[in-house]
Amino acid sequence: MSQHKCELNFLSRSDGSALYSIGNTVALASVNGPGDTKKSNRLYNRSHLDVVYSPCTGQPMIGERALEAIIARTIEQVVLVHLHPRTAINVTIQEMQSDGLALSTSVNAACMALMDAAIQMNNTFAAVTCCITGDDIIKIEPTEAEIKESVAVATFVFEGLSLQVLSAHQEGRLNEETFQSCLSKCQIAAKDVFNFYRQTMEKKYKDDIY
Amino acid sequence: MTAKVGNVRTLRVALPGDEVLQFNPDKDKDRIFIGPGLRWKENIVRATRPGLLKKTTKNLYYVDTHQKRYIPQKREFVIGIVMKKKGDNYVIDIGASDQATISYLAFENASKKTRKEMKLGDLLYGQLLVANKDMEPELVCIDVYNRAVGMGTLPEGGVMFTVPLHVARQIVNPNNPFLKTIKRFNESLPVPALNTRVSALVLGKRAAMTEAAKNKTEVTADREHGDVRRKDDYKPWRLSRTWGSSDGAKMTSPRPVRRRGTARVCSRPSHWATAGNQSSVPPLPQSP
């Protein structure tokens, strides 16, 4: 498993932000809200969630829009949107460095940024990516080169309480047996990620304990 | 890791979704109070925000969290900026997702003939009368007895700055060392509010001294608090001292009736103001 690193409150002007890295992939997530928004985004019973993803080079294209959609669906399941009707919560993710784990890094960055902004959530969430090589070896959190040589890549997002799957994303073909073993391996890896979250939060609040 | 200050005990760092305690109102006889950052669902109290889980001696649980975005709460004192005039109301920006309103009659001694006139950009220190997720927040600058008790427009020539919410909650405590330090350099007190804003009337120390010398007959040096102030001066920015303390004028407002055997959601713990650090501050330097 690659090394996770996180710096909270990285941006001074946003309500919450986090710089998150898994291995050599780095993403910066910023959360603003619950704040005012234009009329078309104002929902009468819940807060509008907006996710924007921009890659490190070039314009956001269809691939980035797909990532936005996955992240938005994941966040939507966790954030208590009904608490702030007619507002918007904006999550902006900037990819800083890319090494194949863009999705899991930005999901984790988004979770840390949401926690930094103290948005009310019923749960935490963490993403783990794995890839399967031609001879059926599962690699957790591979590098870009390893992904290129692999048969399939799968990313799972788990929730923190009972490690249930919130979203799953797969590229390439997997039979059910391999899929299940991928899932269980990622689930075990997710526990470490949640422990890392806790350590990061404890570090943030340790100065306040007197 | 548990530390106790006053009535408040810090239990641990909680993350969203963490189970704080189990509470079944049919079985459990001890009543508990659920403060901000916690939700009670299916007989389990869980955290919804990351932060320090705290418990008071009166069984009030809450999560003390670092936050930059203000979410209005009823009865909180806030500083707002006058944005525009809209009919009989002023629209005030209090840093929340919605702009607040205040009626021109919601000031001390204001009537339809002697209405309160405010310019755009004026600062206002008021209290939230209405604050819930479905309605526009509404401010007032009077209490239930129609007294200003320190609320109203803030004087010109000051400076307003923003701080994160957890800092704002700490410096509403009159014994906060930051307040005491800033008081040494100012003629008047800074006005801390609960909405990420602090306003201070900045006059240099020397200016404060000349001002004091001019009004020598009226000046009393308040040894206890270590600042200089004029007698019978009833200005809005003085209120910050009496906020939550026993000697000053306090807002009185009806408390909601507590039902037996139910977990109640409190808007803000009343012990918050006493939770800060208590430390001494060096005395005011002697005037030349």
Image (cartoon, rainbow, N blue to C red):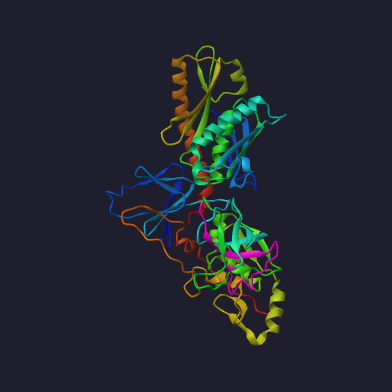
Task: Tell me where residue A146 appears, x and y as whole percent.
Answer: 59, 19
Which of the 4 quarters of the picture holds residue B198?
Answer: bottom right
Total count of labels: 0
- The extreme top residue here reads A135
**Which residue lies at the image location 54% right of the left edge and 65% below the top edge?**
B176
Q: Is residue A144 above or below residue B201?
A: above
Q: Is residue B2 left or right of residue A6?
A: left
Relative to the observer, which residue lies in front, B26 or A96?
B26
Question: For residue B121: magenta?
Answer: yes
Question: For residue A61: magenta?
Answer: no
**Which residue lies at the image location 55% right of the left edge and 40% below the top edge?**
A112
Q: In this view, does A138 lie above or below B263?
A: above
Task: Tell me where residue B195 appears, x and y as whole percent.
Answer: 58, 58
Magenta segment, prevailing SS (helix, strand or loop): loop
Q: Give the range drawn in magenta.
A: B105-132
Task: Tell me where residue B127 appears, x and y as whole percent.
Answer: 55, 64
Task: Tell me where residue A163 appears, x and y as whole percent.
Answer: 43, 32
Relative to the observer, which residue lies in front, A209 or B193?
B193
- The extreme bottom residue here reads B217
Q: For the C terminus of chain B, which image quadrant? A: bottom right
